């Protein structure tokens, strides 16, 4: 009869590290976390935000975060942050969860060897702060409502004595036609318009920031949906009122009224474009005051392109989304094709039942 081997729990055998060793190790782990997030393509601001959240929790906890247990997280989120804005609580919990995912994937064995602890995320289904930043639906206006806005806004330009409203109109029009973000519109140069590419021309989009900090990808946006006509009109009839040198390298597509020291026009800021849209909405589509933003115009663009037959992958390319799931959240179908399909199915089912009854 074979003898049974003695089974030992390895968790009982660990060599405790000194305070200095743990301090160095904690610093190295955080540096590795930052590098890993940078290699994933996250923007510097997003990484700084996550590290800031972790630093706030670490300061409160007073010990390395891998020592945290669910009970500690209960106290922190249930008492310390009880009355903080939901966005702060959510962002902090997401940063902590991501950090622990990094610990478990990269350093679980080392942490156990040095401390005897098994690193496990203290955020679970019971104490996870409610809400999600990506859950909010931004349902855009209908096509007739957007047409009302730009028709009224365009009519106003005919009697306008200044040219900035025309610039703001054009930028917002492009947001609704090809889904430009306001930061992307501000960063465009005249040279970014490539009239000789494709059937309608293309726009070289190089700037911007998307959800989750990863940022929209540099891309060539086809000037579809009337965007080519919008840009030709603006450049031929309006742009010269801001600047007189079309050949200057880096000349902004949407200039500011302010000048550089050499007399050339500066680049417009996003506040000017946002305020221009806000004022136009108040004047021509007041029911959408404080609700129709550049971001919502992007949702309108995606929904319109989808309704006109463009597939999701094509819309993803136009908007510069990294994930098709993001594009899907932009689609809000105004048509009744789902309801129509359901009604037709019910009608077919009724006929089948009628035939069985006979």
Image: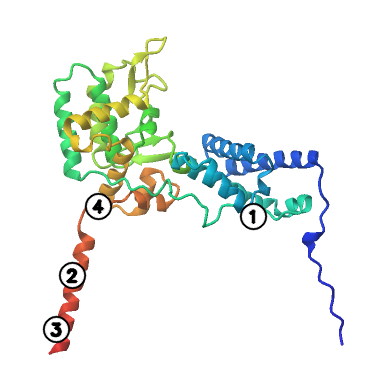
Q: Is residue 249 above or below residue 68?
A: above
Name the secondary structure under disc 4. helix
The residue that disc 4 covers is: 307
Residue 95 x %, y %: 55, 44
Q: CA distance from mark 4 to mark 3?
A: 35 Å
* Left or right placement of residue 14 versus residue 143 in this view: right
- Tell us which disc is closer to us: 1 or 3: 1
Name the secondary structure under disc 3. helix
Query: Which numbered disc covers residue 120?
Result: 1
- Tell us which disc is closer to us: 4 or 2: 2
* Left or right placement of residue 314 versus residue 160 in this view: right
Do the residues under discs 1 and 3 have CB atoms within 8 angstroms? no
Q: CA distance from mark 3 to mark 2?
A: 15 Å
- Tell us which disc is closer to us: 4 or 3: 3
Name the secondary structure under disc 1. loop
Q: Earlier in the sequence, mark 2 or mark 1?
A: 1
The N terminus: image quadrant: bottom right
The C terminus: image quadrant: bottom left
Q: 93 or 233, which lies in front?
A: 93
The residue that disc 3 covers is: 354
Residue sitting at x 15%, y 80% = 351
């Amino acid at each position: 009869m074979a003898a049974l081997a003695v089974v030992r729990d390895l968790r009982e055998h660990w060599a405790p590290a000194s305070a200095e060793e743990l301090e160095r190790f904690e610093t190295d782990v955080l540096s590795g976390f930052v590098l890993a997030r940078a290699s994933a393509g996250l923007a510097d601001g997003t990484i700084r935000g996550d590290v800031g959240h972790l630093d706030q929790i670490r300061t409160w906890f007073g010990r390395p975060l891998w020592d945290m247990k669910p009970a500690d997280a209960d106290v922190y989120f249930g008492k310390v942050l009880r009355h903080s804005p939901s966005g702060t609580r959510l962002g902090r919990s997401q940063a902590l969860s991501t950090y622990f995912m990094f610990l478990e994937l990269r350093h679980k064995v080392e942490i156990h060897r040095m401390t005897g602890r098994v690193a496990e995320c203290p955020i679970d289904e019971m104490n996870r702060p409610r809400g999600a930043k990506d859950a909010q639906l931004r349902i855009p206006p209908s096509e007739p409502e957007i047409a009302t806005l730009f028709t009224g806004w365009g009519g106003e330009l005919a009697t306008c004595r200044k040219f900035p409203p025309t610039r703001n109109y054009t930028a917002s029009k492009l947001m609704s036609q090809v889904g430009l973000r306001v930061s992307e519109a501000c960063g465009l140069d005249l040279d970014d318009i490539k009239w000789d590419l494709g059937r309608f021309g293309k726009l070289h989009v190089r700037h911007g920031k998307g959800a989750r900090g990863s940022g929209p990808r540099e891309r060539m946006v086809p000037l579809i949906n009337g965007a080519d006509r919008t840009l030709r009109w603006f450049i031929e009839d309006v742009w010269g009122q801001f600047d007189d040198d079309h050949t200057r390298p880096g000349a902004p597509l949407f200039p500011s009224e302010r000048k550089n020291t050499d007399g050339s026009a500066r680049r417009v800021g996003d506040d000017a474009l946002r305020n221009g849209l806000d004022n136009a909405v108040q004047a021509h589509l007041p029911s959408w005051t404080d609700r129709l933003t550049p971001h919502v115009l992007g949702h309108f663009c995606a929904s319109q392109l989808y309704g006109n037959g463009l597939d999701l992958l094509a819309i993803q390319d136009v908007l510069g989304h990294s994930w098709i799931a993001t594009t899907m959240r932009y689609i809000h179908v105004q048509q009744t094709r789902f309801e129509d399909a359901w009604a037709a199915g019910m009608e077919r089912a009724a006929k089948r039942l009628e035939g069985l009854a006979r």
